[in-house]
Image: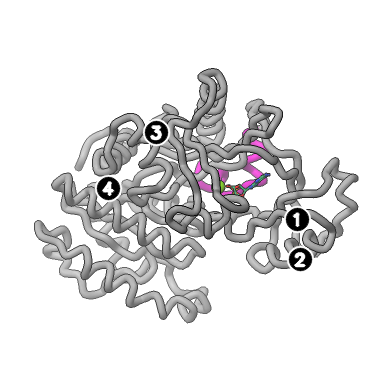
Amino acid sequence: MKIVVLCGGISTEREISIISGEGVVRALREKGHRAILLDVYFGDEYVQLMDAFPEHYDIDAALQKIHACDEQLASAKANPTRSFFGANVIKLCRMADIVFLALHGQNGEDGKVQAAFDLSGIRYTGAGPLGSAMAMDKRITKIMLKAQGIPVPRGISVMKGEKIEPLEKYGLKYPVVVKVCCGGSSVGVYIAHDANAFDESLSTAFLYEDRVIIEEYIEGREFSVGVVDGEALPVIEIAPKEGFYDYKNKYTAGATVETCPADLPGDVAKTIRSYAVRGYQALCLEGYARLDFMMQHDGRIYCLEANTLPGMTPTSLIPQEAGALGIDYPTLCEKLIEVSLKKYGGKVR
Ligand SMILES: Nc1ncnc2c1ncn2[C@@H]1O[C@H](COP(=O)(O)OP(=O)(O)O)[C@@H](O)[C@H]1O
Ligand SMILES: [Mg+2]
């Protein structure tokens, strides 16, 4: 198949998206596909459209080109009138049989690219615009999950400038979690143990976004579950050696112990997996997604959020969960394409 692996962009998760993209393009090449790697924002004005999906492809050269754009990032972000799609991006995506979205965070994961692609006749992996947009917004996510009877941490959302009453009025007490409504990769997530830390967390979170979630801190064990084509993968446990699962613990090798399948009684694992599947359905997700959970010391389980384009590096959580079933990384990448194609009737053009 001719496949564009789309990565990069200008979200706070650009770096990790490029690592996901690299992993996916290598895996798909290994499987014999004519996959190419493209930065959604910077594109490639020198690509030979006549031979855009070559038999032999230099992945390292593609990565070098993408990283050469890193330094233009600040000035690019300051130019809001520029199209989000870089040179030749739409053209190449239209020429591909499918686009593997290795984007993470704003613009890539929030449904806008998906909507643009739907209108342009471009096929892509994962959820469509509606599910992506709902899952990107943690306030909407919690409303949808709660309506399905899936427990979520008690909390509120506040807009910048809005007056906040004492926490007790909302049934909250310290510690609380302060997090940006549409963030990812734990950027803009803080645990506040007292009023000073709370004020500081709020001011910092509002530097990123105008809407912030304040919710009860669930102390206990953390889990995540991938859902592929409506079916849950095995539960993975995430245990940072220090602190919580913040950006550093997510992306520093060895900082977090990840165990799959998680050491849990069968019925508990079953409950978490069924919440994951029901959450996936409630949020109108398609293809694949990953839902994050906390289990309080008393055994109560809470869903934190859903990720529609979860990390896809070879050591990311979903690849580990698939690995526990004996599905290797290249096979998983191919499977995600196969299940995403179902939406389009399952056939390659
Ligand atoms: N209510 C909560 N209680 C305890 N820990 C939390 C809570 N909310 C978030 N966290 C911690 O912060 C991390 C990131 O939060 P999450 O809601 O998953 O946002 P994202 O991954 O999109 O940045 C979680 O993996 C978890 O470790
Ligand atoms: Mg998360």
Q: Which residue is mark 1?
A: 192
Mark 1 or mark 3: whose residue is earlier in sequence: 1
Instruction: Between residue 215 and residue 223, name the one nearer to us.
Output: 223
Q: Is residue 250 above or below residue 207?
A: above
Mark 4 or mark 2: whose residue is earlier in sequence: 4
Element type where label 2 sits in the image: helix
**Relative to residue 74, is residue 55 drawn left or right?**
left
Q: Which residue is mark 4?
A: 98
Q: Amino acid at mark 2?
A: Glu
Element type where label 1 sits in the image: strand
Mark 1, mark 4: which one is toward the viewer? 1
Residue 335 falls in image quadrant: top left
Q: Are marks 2 and 3 in contact (CB under 8 Å)?
A: no
Q: Is residue 117 above or below residue 344?
A: below
Magenta range is 131-145
Q: Residue 33, image x and y in percent?
A: 17, 48
Mark 3, mark 4: which one is toward the viewer? 3
Q: Amino acid at mark 4?
A: Ile
Mark 1 or mark 4: whose residue is earlier in sequence: 4
Q: Is residue 165 above or below residue 230?
A: below
Q: Are marks 2 and 1 in contact (CB under 8 Å)?
A: yes
Mark 2, mark 3: which one is toward the viewer? 2
Q: Is residue 170 above or below residue 268?
A: below
Q: Residues within 10 Å of mark 1 (few under 14, many from 20)?
A: many
**Residue at left offset 72%, top offset 44%:** 217
Q: Amino acid at mark 1?
A: Ala
Q: Residue 216, image x and y in percent?
A: 75, 43
Q: Which residue is mark 3?
A: 228
Element type where label 4 sits in the image: strand
Element type where label 3 sits in the image: strand
Mark 3 or mark 4: whose residue is earlier in sequence: 4
